[in-house]
Image (cartoon, coloured by chain):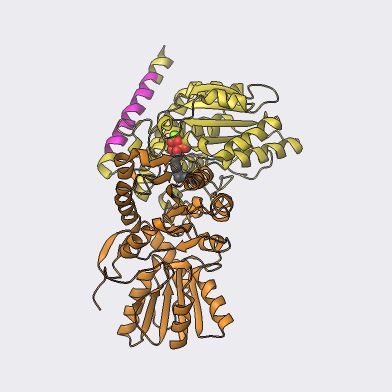
Chain colours: A orange, B yellow
Amino acid sequence: MQPLQLGSPNQQVFSDTLLAMAEESRNLLVVTSDSRGSGRLVAFGKRLPDQIVEVGIAEQNLVGVAAGLAAAGKCVYAVSPACFLTARSLEQIKNDVAYSDHPVKLIGISAGVSYGALGTTHHSLHDFAVLQAINNIDIVAPADNFETRRCAGVRHAPQTTYIRLGKKAMHRLHTPDTPFAIGRAIPVRQGSDVAFLATGETVETAVQAADALAERGVSAAVLSIHSIRPFDEEAVLKMAKQVQAIVTVEEHSVLGGLGSRVASLLLQAGVTPRLRIVGIPDEYTWTGSQQDILNTMASRRRVGGDGGRLA
Amino acid sequence: MAIPMLNSELEHKSIQYRKTILTSIAHAGAGHTGGSLSCVDILNVLYNQVMNVDAGNPSWPQRDRYIHSKGHSVEALYTVLADKGFFPAEMLATMGRSGSHWVGHPTRKVPGVEQNTGALGHGLSVAVGMAIAAKQDGLPSRVFTLMGDGELSEGSIWEASMSASYYKLDNLVVIIDRNTLQITGRTESVMAQEPLAARFEAFGYAVRTVDGNDIAALLDVFAQAPFAAGKPSLIIARTTKGKGVSFIEDAVDWHHHVPTSAELAIALDELAQAEQRVQDSYATSTTR
Ligand SMILES: Cc1ncc(C[n+]2csc(CCOP(=O)(O)OP(=O)(O)O)c2C)c(N)n1
Ligand SMILES: [Mg+2]
């Protein structure tokens, strides 16, 4: 296996793509809540000051204002740390955006435990769970720069979309001609013994684990489930029928995220390979860097056999 | 009650605190430098002269409460709590390390911390709850909370303010770290906060404005609280973000910039000079 090549942080790729799109369309607006630094939108603000609406440190207002702008026909990206965006502003997301059917793009930055040692206030381990329980929002977590670039282009989709981005530089997983569509899982590795179903930044870790397993003679498949909703039931069921074991991987609580979604699908379809849900356990979150947190988590939840640490 | 200290002793402490803040942030490789340096004089005066707290008995029911609503400036809080003896100063070296409770925002796992903060705009509501409870229980406790000026954009602060005056919480003292900067830039260009005093007055506070980096001025204003019977008190503490180090002062980039070892050395040197000046002026004033 070729070692994976390091690219840029998904947040950077997203903001570069956003700037390119905004230069083409004056109708595209970005709404920020003192978040343009972490959202890597400083250059955007300098270049297109009329296309950035700043609300100050007020995430509820951010989402409400975004809803109003979208109602008036603007193409709106509301950018704020995932932890605040999907907790503080949850009611605005539910009522003002999703229920009222305004196609706002909610961009959750520094998601999961990207903020590491800043602690639990800054972690978003609940966003898949709460947003899945709210009807009418697509939920997307791109794995690498390619997926990020492609999902940034959802601007013409009439659908409300939450896009979950991380802060660290990501490895390249796909070639530029890989087919991409919201709601379609992407196979990253083929395999017949075990399958890793991973989402967002954890896909590259699953790929590393699969490659390590391959050296030990275990054939491991990897699917990048960038869309938590719409969910690619077909691809997951197909995969579950061809392997002995499924390991879901996510930088999210083990409750209410990808793992729960897969378990509920498989059980109800009567397809029951062995299943292991890897994520952040339901405990007081360990503190330290993103990597420390993932390592600690993984040492509690080992991937069967010699799979080793997940992070 | 706190043992009275000379202003020069407190000024000396502020300088020591600034050194500890900078050293800890450099050691941890992360931290909120500007906001910790802007508010540390306020914490110094509160913990050393104003509040009734006992490090040996941190859950003493009669104690005064302090909530660090601008939780990102955690290094200032940890530094002062360590100096007060709530925990050994060595713990500061574990900041941000794997498994340490000394994380980048205050948590109650750290002795002396009353409330977990870090998401802005929460502290005041919790303080209001504590102040109502103290009144109901007939306790002498006062409740203090410190907020950033950028933080004031959060709507929850205004909800809490309404209840603070409705419940006539004259045992509540709210302090605004008015350093005029937030992450993106000047508050007045990101989201204007003026007319600040008038807004808070309209919400029912008795308001005072003070130089928030001046020990004597802070001692004086806290001594006057409550400013009016039956009203919550609010202090607009005009501060300089990054106060005490020339190249960090009033510099937007230093919100969470971490000093390099070279920058740390210059900063510590500047602070050593400031310390010398405090000592010199103290020596002249006592010989006179
Ligand atoms: C709810 C919430 N939104 C955003 C942030 C990110 N954040 C941390 S500090 C900060 C700027 C704070 O500015 P200010 O209140 O003026 O603090 P100071 O200047 O004293 O550092 C922001 C936006 C946060 N911690 N909480
Ligand atoms: Mg400020």
Give the x, y percent position of residue A265. Answer: 54, 77
Q: Position of residue A197 (x, y in %)?
A: 43, 75
* Horizontal arrangement in the rendering, residue A22 relative to residue A72 (left or right): left
The overriding secondary structure of the stretch rendered in magenta is helix
Whether the magenta-drawn stretch holds residue A250 is answered as no
Q: In the picture provided, is B261 more to the left or to the right than A96?
A: left
Q: Is residue B13 above or below residue B74?
A: above
Q: Quadrant of the N terminus of chain B?
A: top right
| Front one among B92 and B258 | B258
Rendered location of residue A208, percent (x, y): 33, 74
Residue B132 relative to residue A198: left or right: right
Magenta region: B264-281
Residue A264: give x, y in percent of width and height.
57, 76
Which is nearer the eye, A96 or B25? A96
Q: Is residue B118 visible?
A: no
**Number of on-image labels:** 0
- Residue A155's quadrant in the figure? bottom left
Q: Does A110 appear above or below B67?
A: below
Residue B271 placement: quadrant = top left
